[in-house]
Image: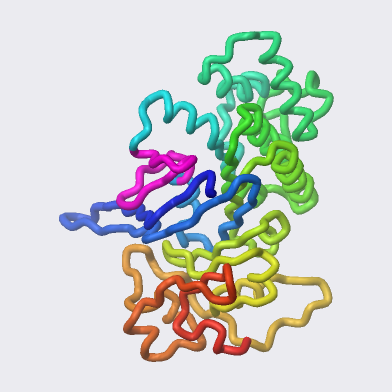
Amino acid sequence: MSVIMATRLKVHYKIRRGLSSLVVRAVDGVTLGVKKGEVLGIVGESGCGKSTLARTLAGLERPTEGEIYFEDKPLSKFNREERKRFHKSVQMVFQDPYDAINPRYNVFQTIAEGLIVQGFKDKKLLKEKIEQALTMVRLTPPESFEFRYPYELSGGQLQRVAIARALVLEPNVLIADEPVSMLDVSVRAEVLNTLIEAKKSREMSVVFVSHDIALAEYVSERLAVMYLGQIVESAPAEELINNPLHPYTQALIDAVPEIGKKPSDRELIKGEIASSVNIPTGCRFHPRCPYAKEICKEREPELEELNGNHLVACHFAGKLGY
């Protein structure tokens, strides 16, 4: 059973240009679920809609169509108390901690805010919980960090404060949107390991959003590849990396740099991702795909199950011989 699930989810925005209006199809028909204790990685280029999907799963965006289910109940049917419990149970860590944290709050106030909103009043226990959260994210000793302000912390320390703020509420689901993309490589592993340890100790589900498929594989048990608002491939992480069935997934894997690895002889994708305002007909990837045929321009492939629990949306899945 999925702890949180999206069904046929669409998030469209109308934008005005002069006298006319355009529709941005940021998320355009996504169905996926996250099981208890599972880490689901969502990967794709900038502009594919993965951050919008993450915010919608967290209840921060209202879907145009489709539904979010939490513990088998649709979010749209929640009353005020149920929605308050949902926002305690589903926490989000944003990409830029400098934008996500109030610069006027010190570390103690930042982490305490969510507990206070949820009605937590015991001051002694509040301090204990905050110190436990700081210890969990390796900001020790806690008393040396509690009363610092954001400008007194490094980027890595501030992102760990953001993670502590989410973890102190003991969520069932943590949604991490590019949580290490703004950090130095030297501190990325430490922050990622913090997330992994927190997930294991609490049996927490994690949705890990990243443009880096290698990074997502490191933390995830299952991967979903997103392109122009849709999931084009999904499978257990090891299976997807070792046996990619969609040309876009293969291109993402080929683009990962490795020490001592020669560049691939395969033709990588060309050009930039198309605009969500003007989505190509047929397969959305066909203008950039080196294997595209006429059918790809005319008919959109459906997400179908191949090889057990491996889902892929490609007319020629498994027949391209990468």
Q: Does the magenta stretch include residue 34?
A: no
Q: How far across and down, in percent of the image, does residue 293 sit?
A: 42, 90
Magenta residues?
57-76
Front residue (pair 106, 53): 53
Q: Coloured how?
A: rainbow
- Position of 260 with respect to 153 (left or right) is right
Q: Quadrant of residue 260?
A: bottom right
Q: Which residue is drawn at 76% across and 53% down?
A: 185
Q: Residue at x 42, y 24 (%)?
A: 81
- Position of 64 with respect to 99 (left or right) is left
287 versus 202 height, above or below: below
- Asked if residue 26 shows in the view, the reply is no
Q: In which quarter of the image is residue 62?
A: top left
Q: How far across and down, in percent of the image, does residue 4 sit?
A: 50, 45
Front residue (pair 262, 315): 315
Q: Residue at x 69, y 13 (%)?
A: 125
- Position of 221 with respect to 25 (left or right) is right
82 versus 267 height, above or below: above
Q: Residue at x 70, y 20 (%)?
A: 129
- Asked if residue 175 shows in the view, the reply is yes
